[in-house]
Each structure stands twice: as structure tokens, then as C-alpha cells.
Amino acid sequence: MHLKDELQAVKTLKAKERYDLLKKQFELCSEGIDVTGSEVDCLTILVNLIGKEAEELNSSLHAKWVVEAESFWVKFQKVASQLHTHNLKWPDSRVNLQHQIRVIPEIGPLPKFGWSGNSSDYRVGRLLTSTFYWQGAEHSLVSVWLEDFVEWRKAAYKLGITKAFWYQIKRELENLFQESHFPDVVDSYSSELLFPYKDHYLTVTPVVSHSTQLSVQRLVGLPTHSLSFPHPSALGILCGSLGGHVRMLKLSPVHNLRSRQSSLNSLRSYLEPYSLTAKYATNIYREVTDVKIYSSLRLKRKARLRVLCALDNILEEWMSPLIQAKLASKNISKIESLSQEEQNFLEMSFVDIEDFSRYLNRKLHGELERNKYTRHFSYHQRLVGVTQKRLMSFLKHVLSEKPSSEASGETFLVFKNLRINEANGLNNAYVAGMPSMIGLYGFLHQFERQLSEIYPDVSVASFALHCSHYCAHGSIALPAPSIPDKEMRIKRSGVMPEFKFDGKFSIIVKLNRPTDNDDPLDIEQVKAALPERLWGGSIHPPYLYEDTEWASIVSGANNLKQYMARHMFFGNWISPEKENKLDFDDRVELLKANHDLSLCLVGYDLLEPIKSRNVISGIHAFCEPLIDLCRLKQTFKVIRGAKPLEQGLFWQYVPVSQNCTTLRVSPVCGETHAASQSAEL
């Protein structure tokens, strides 16, 4: 909407309503208003918004009175020096006001600026950070002043700003934004993380990007979680403009799993018809049976592969409980509700795959016939042969693969069904709820250090993560006591929102061992080396009544697949996606299109060269959280995957070079990640 139209539309409203509507148009999270040709009105409204004295926001007389005051320009210069691209005060407002970060690119336009400082200067901060559209481009008062547009200079003249003073402010802004700026010291309330660096450690401080956090507030079509802060203006302009209710993406490592009973002897755990007759499945059957005309053979093949992949997912979900019971290393008593063919499948060591796949195909189409929505797909000539082939293919992939008896140089540690309580779901400012993969690397790095005291030649090569149970909950926490009052009683500086999760996670660790070392690892000593905390939460072994051995050593990838099928069949594997150069918004669009994808914290991008600061390690850098795509895979998809197990499922830490720009974990794919290349910042 254009500002002229908005001013005309609000004339008939009451004064308070006019004030609120015009003010809303210049808030950070608004859609933005076009001010082309209305530069004077725009500048007048922005100036009048710094106080409550103006009866009308478009009153030029009041705006002239404001800009004539010397105190206004003192605050203007002070607030301009506090503009930032990354907010150090998030999420703890106790960070010192003098610490600001501005990352200015060498070429290209200036980035979007936020502001954080004293709450009394909030309104002036809004003056400098409010955005609007002018001549088709998004601008702020800072950008039009630096670009020295004639229309805006003339608008300033009409409010009493002289030409000399205009250029004086322009020079001061140019001095502020001609290069990047970082604090010389690290505030005591800023977080500090340690990463291996050469033979020592590097300390990094994560800071939130203002532009990325702003884009998250505008997202639609994805679940979100809102954090509520009691003193929003103390955290910055973005939190203040939202009234303290800041949104984050809310994701889960098990969001695409349908809840099921875990008991193997429960009828509902075997061949449930729901997965075959659901609305999604009905749409897939329709696509398989419909005959469509495509403009090229390539498009036809691509569409066919997509729909067959979706059909595989339906059939595998339907069969997976029965397959898991078959692979489980326990004797299953006779179940009256199962047919004789199904009971024989569970009990007999040899299975005629072709014959049993025919039986399953008959049962499948029988279930379709009993449902009124899928009845016309039962024994359809274009579907019955396809389902027969897909069922046989799945059974062959899962059942025909035998454990390898040959010696293998690969050694895997499996920590099964570890209970994680009160883990931190706010490991970054953009996505809530997902476990941090770089945090898991830190856990395993500590495990490696403690294990090296017993086995000096053993190290962690890569790792995989599996989640079988997950429960998230938000809460409010009290920060550490910090402010003594006159009577020497300790006060707490407000409250802080939290987002915690509990769950059951399994971790697989691939170990590096010398080829000439054949000494077996003592599993009890390995257990003793496991750290007690992960993601800020406590780790516990499975409950005693589960009667399970939670730590095992597996040799060889084939044996590992069989172990996964027997003991970790239900749940999701958080697997890495192929690396790409997409930005955060592009990753979000992919997330909307694919329910198997998710976002998680995989590392940190350094914002500056490594330098000496007042930290434990002596060397330090400020960094931004790196959020990347991951894929949630079920075990049966991992087992039958075309890629080698390690390349499709495992993560590894990228070795740090001397001039590294990224600290992250990435897929084990045999390719050199961009972060491992030396690059000057």
C-alpha cells in the first residue's frame, strides 16, 4: 500500500486509531509501505514516532520542533553507533551495552541493521531501523542518507535540516559503516564454546543474525514456537517491536512418525490396515493407476519413480512391525490373532520370499476391498502387479542379507536407548526442538578424551543419531542471581524462557583403530568413559525393566545393519543431507515441500579472523549459528538404501584449517567440504 493512500484512509478514524495504524506500517515485521513521492510525509512520521507528544504523526510543525533540539541529535548519533547486524544481547539482556557487532560486506549494499541498547533509546532505534519501499527497493533512513538521494535531501530541508548538517551526518554514518566492527572483549554474560584447533582449543561466541531472525518472524506454513520475554525492549528493536513474543521454527526429530504400540504381542502392531487405507495412500494408488500423458519420456520416468517411492513408503510402514518381530532376537509365542502364514513367517528360520510376498499381496488387496474409499483399487490391473514386485523387493532387501562372518577393520560402538532428560531445545535462535549435531560432536569429543586414558590409540571417526521417543515442553527459568541491592540481598534480573526436551536416543560411533591392534575393547571400560551430560541434559541408561544391554561393539557394516534392524527398527535417524549453497530462506522452502526434511544446528560460521581476547583459550572469534538441512529416515529405508551405510547416515567433524571460516559437522561422503578449504575472511 502507498503512504498517500494510507493517510487518506485514516482521516475518518479517531486520533488514537490513526496513530496506531500509521505506527504499525513502520514496524520491523510489517509488510512494508511504499513511500515513493511521499518522502516528506515518511520522514515526518518517523521523526514524530520518537516521542508521544505529537497529536498527529504527519504534523510537520512538531517534527521541525523535534529536529531543532540538540538532545535529539545527541541521541541520534549514540543510537547510530549501536546499530548491529548480529545481536549480542540475545537472549540475555545483561550483556554490556557498549558491545556491538557490525559485519559489513566489502562489496554490495549494506545489510539490514537492528539495534540494542538502553531501553530509553528504543524509539530512536526504531527511527533508524524502520524499513519502507522507495522506488521499488527496500530502504531505511540510514540507507537513503548514505546514498544521498536528492528527494530525501529536499525532504530533510523542509523539516529544517540544513545542507551542511545533512552532509555532516552523512560523513559520520560513512565512518560508522565503512568497515566491520567487533568488540575487543567478551562480556561475562556471553556464551563461550571451545573447539579443537591445531594442538589447542579455539573459543567462539555465537551471536544471532538480525536479518535471519527477522525472516523467521515472517514465515508462514510451518509450526512455530513463541518465546515471551518480560522486558522486550532491553533485548533489542526486533524483540521490542513484537511485544516480547519472538517466534522460532518448532521442529521435532520424530514429527513424521505415527504413534504405535511397542508391544510385539499386540495385534495392532502387525499389518495395520490404516497405513493402507489412509487418504495419503489413496492418492498414491490413484496416481499409480491413472494414465497420464507427459511431454517427454524423461518427465514420465521421473513422475513414475516419485510415485513408486511413495508407494514403497506405504508398504514398508505396513510391513515394518512384522519384519521387526521377525528380526528380533527373542522367541515369540504363538499369537492367536495372526494367520498361520504370518506365524510361520515369524517362527521359521527359512522363508520362501516369493510365496510369502504373494500372501502379503493378497492380504493387502483384501484390506483395500474392505474399505469403501479404496475398494475400487483392490486387484486393479495396474496396481496388483506393482505391489507384488515392491513387496518382494522389500523382503529380499531386509531378509536376504546375512551377517558377515569375515573379519572387518570397521569397529562401531552402539549406545542404545539412552534416556536424555531436560535437554536444551534452544541451541540456536531460529529453530527450537531439534537436537544439535555439533553439540553431539562435542559430547563425543569429551568421550574420546576420556576413552584415550584407557585406549590411547582409539579415536572417533564419525557418528550417527537415532531417536525413538521424544517429548518437548516449554517453561520459564530464573537466571543466575547477579544484582545485590542496598540491603545486600541478591536480586535476579527477570526471567528467561526455556524449551526443553526429553527422549530416548541411540548413538552409533565409528572408531579409528590401528590396523595392527586386534585387542578387543572392554565394554565396561567404554561405558565408564561416557560423559554424563548431553545437550545440557542428563544421560541415563534404559530402565531396568526393559532388560536390555545398552552398550555394544559391532564389527562391520553388514553386522551393523542387522543390529539396527533387530534393536533400533522404530524411530528416526537424523541423517545429513547433501551439502549445498542455499541460504536460510531457500532451505525453509525445501522444508515445506518435503515432510522428511528438517533443520538442525550443524556448526558455526566465523564472522571474523581468529584473534586474541580475554577468554580461557586465549584465542577467540565471534560466530553465527549454521542451520542446515537433515533428513529423518526410518530404519527400513536405511537398511535398503543404495548408498554405503556410513555415507548415507553418519556425520563427521570437518578438520579445522589455519584460516578456517566454518566449524561444522558434515556428511561422510568422501568430498572436501567448503569449510575445510583455507579462506581469508
Image (cartoon, helix red, strand yellow):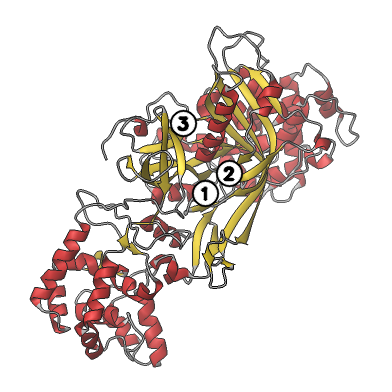
Task: Indicate which disc, 3 or 1, sits on the residue closer to the N terminus.
Answer: 1
Crowd around label 3: few <14 · some 14–19 · many ≥20 (10 Å): many
Q: What mark, if any, has residue 264 been given in the picture?
A: none
Going by the numbered disc 2, the residue's amino acid type is Trp
Q: Which residue is mark 3?
A: 653
Going by the numbered disc 3, the residue's amino acid type is Tyr
- Give whichever of 82, 655 is nearer the camera: 82
Q: Which residue is mark 2?
A: 535
Q: Is residue 549 left or right of residue 52?
A: right
Q: Which residue is mark 1?
A: 427
Going by the numbered disc 1, the residue's amino acid type is Asn
Query: Which quadrant: the N terminus?
Result: bottom left
The location of residue 72, given as percent across then percent down, is: 25, 79
Task: Indicate which disc, 3 or 2, sits on the residue closer to the N terminus.
Answer: 2
The location of residue 268, given as percent across then percent down, is: 80, 42
Q: Secondary structure at mark 3?
A: strand
